[in-house]
Amino acid sequence: MDSSPANKRFAEDIKVTFPLLSDWNRTTTKDYGLYNDVSGYGRRATFVVGKDGKIEHVEVGNTAIDPSGAYQACDLLMKKKKSE
């Protein structure tokens, strides 16, 4: 888990403009079923959220570190919208 300042720096380094969550109390991690009771930490996850606020895609675990899955999900969503 990273602090808010560490997340801010990371976001600057990778040039993202959306906020990154620092879940010190693990509230969100538990709410989304990512908390590991044994280790006391959450699993990494990337969520693709549509403009309507609906979660469209979730990458959990080591693949969440690589943005490729999120990019692919966004690409599929854009293609789907264009065909509607």
Image (cartoon, rainbow, N blue to C red):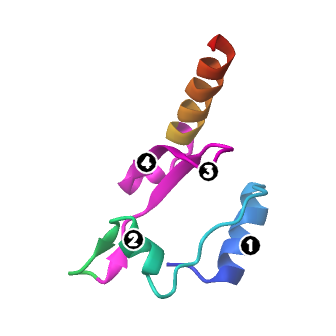
Mark nearer the viewer, 2 or 4: 2
Which residue does the image show at 51% across and 86% down from the upper left?
A: 24
Which one is earlier in the sequence, the residue at label 3 or at label 2?
2
Point out which mark residue 9 bears: 1
Quarter of the image holding residue 44? bottom left
**Closer-to-camera residue (34/41):** 34
Residue indicated by mark 2:
31
| Residue 53: numbered disc | 3
The residue at which mark 4 appears reads as 59
Task: Determine the secondary structure under disc 4.
Answer: strand
The part of the chain drawn in magenta is 40-68
Q: Is residue 30 above or below residue 83?
A: below
Q: Amino acid at mark 4?
A: Glu
Q: Secondary structure at mark 3?
A: loop
Return the disc, 1 or 3, that comes first in the chain's sequence.
Answer: 1
Vertical placement of residue 12 versus 59, above or below: below
In this rendering, is residue 84 above or below 67?
A: above
Q: Nearer the viewer, mark 1 or mark 4?
A: 4
Task: Return the residue nearer the eye: 35 or 14.
Answer: 35
